[in-house]
Amino acid sequence: MRALVITRHGPPEVLQVQERPDPTPSRGQILIDVRAAGINFADLMARMGLYPDAPKPPCVVGYEVAGTVAAVGDGVDRFAVGDRVAAPVRFGGYAERAVTAADGAFPLPDGMSFEDGAAIPVNYATAWEAIVRAGNVQPGERVLIHSAGGGVGIAATQLAKRAGAEVWGTASPGKHEAIRGFGVDHPIDYTAHGWERSVPDLDLVMDAIGGASFRRSYKLLRAGGRLVCFGASGLVAGNERNLLAAGKTAVQMPWFSIVRQMSASKAVIGLNVLTLWDEHGSGRWSGPLTELIETGAIRPVVAQSFPLEQGADAHRFIGERRNTGKVVLVP
């Protein structure tokens, strides 16, 4: 099979299409003929050598795919060969074929494209954990979603609106009309100095920027508020590793005091979907995501699809923050 390989840590050009052996499903797994694979910001960090959970190069990353079942392992009765599915994968998604645990996959409706399906597993699992499970957003609450034009931001906006929240969202001015269409009530230009002064006290903030942004987000919470920290995109500046920018972001990362949190009655929630997967299995999300699809709560937005051979262009597109929605690879 063909796969897009991170040959070494570096700029987008280190991504190369190579031939690799077809994977084989073990017990409880399915083999998927990949028709679309989602790209996440963590993949860019892995390419740069800034993501410790990623395998060492040469490696194939990719956390989510959509396609058709090509084979099933022993003990699998939920799916049959030919079924249309979407699923999280523990790396290996940037390829023509991938294996994953059957209990983490979910059926893809006939009316949904494979590109849309590949935009679901990671983005909506992250949003569901932040908004529904950990964040417990209630009707009438005020929610701020950073990077509201990205895949997770769009998913979180949809789930927050479903919960009855009022939503603020940060994005560059050119994306404000789009994020309004996704459900953001109050678009915010994060490049404007002092933008936070126009935001009322909040009940929940989703922040994947890191560094000083975590500190600012925490200050915006009112009593009972929750800050969900689920990334550190601020470590990345441009398409190549910038140790100066990464170091600055790391130094600005706040240390939260539990005593002060108790006094202020605020919560800081760390969220790493991969860690939850290791602890609970990917089946943790198959039920909720299937229900959300069936009820129409999930409406994926795909910014652009790239052939596998243009993987470097896809990474560059995301690194330059040009996408509004999910970016996917099409093998």
Image: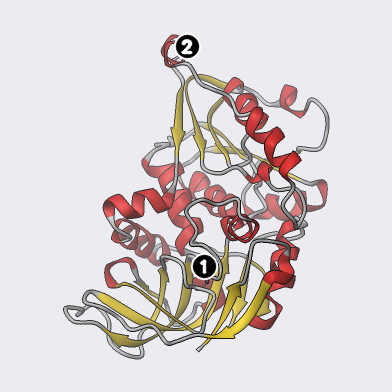
Q: Quadrant of residue 304?
A: bottom right
- The residue beneath circle 1 is 62
Q: Residues within 10 Å of mark 1 (few under 14, many from 20)?
A: many
Work out whether residue 42 or residue 162 is closer to the camera in this orientation and state it.
42
Q: Quadrant of the C terminus?
A: bottom right
Q: CA distance from mark 2 to mark 1?
A: 39 Å
From what the image shows, is residue 272 above or below residue 294?
above
Q: How is the image coloured?
A: secondary structure
- The residue beneath circle 2 is 260
| Kind of residue at badge 1 | Gly
Looking at the rendered structure, the secondary structure element under dot 1 is: loop
- Residue 310 x %, y %: 71, 78
Camera-side mark, 2 or 1:
1
| Kind of residue at badge 2 | Arg
Q: Quadrant of residue 249?
A: top right
The structure residue drawn at horizontal position 56% and vertical position 44%, both measured from the top left corner, is 231
From what the image shows, is residue 23 above or below residue 186?
below
Q: Is residue 10 visible?
A: yes
The structure residue drawn at horizontal position 61% and vertical position 76%, both measured from the top left corner, is 329
Count of picture labels: 2
Looking at the rendered structure, the secondary structure element under dot 2 is: helix
Give left or right: position of 123 versus 178: left
- Residue 171 x %, y %: 73, 45
Of the image marks 2 and 1, the number of the one nearer the N terminus: 1
Work out whether residue 229 or residue 204 is closer to the camera in this orientation and state it.
229
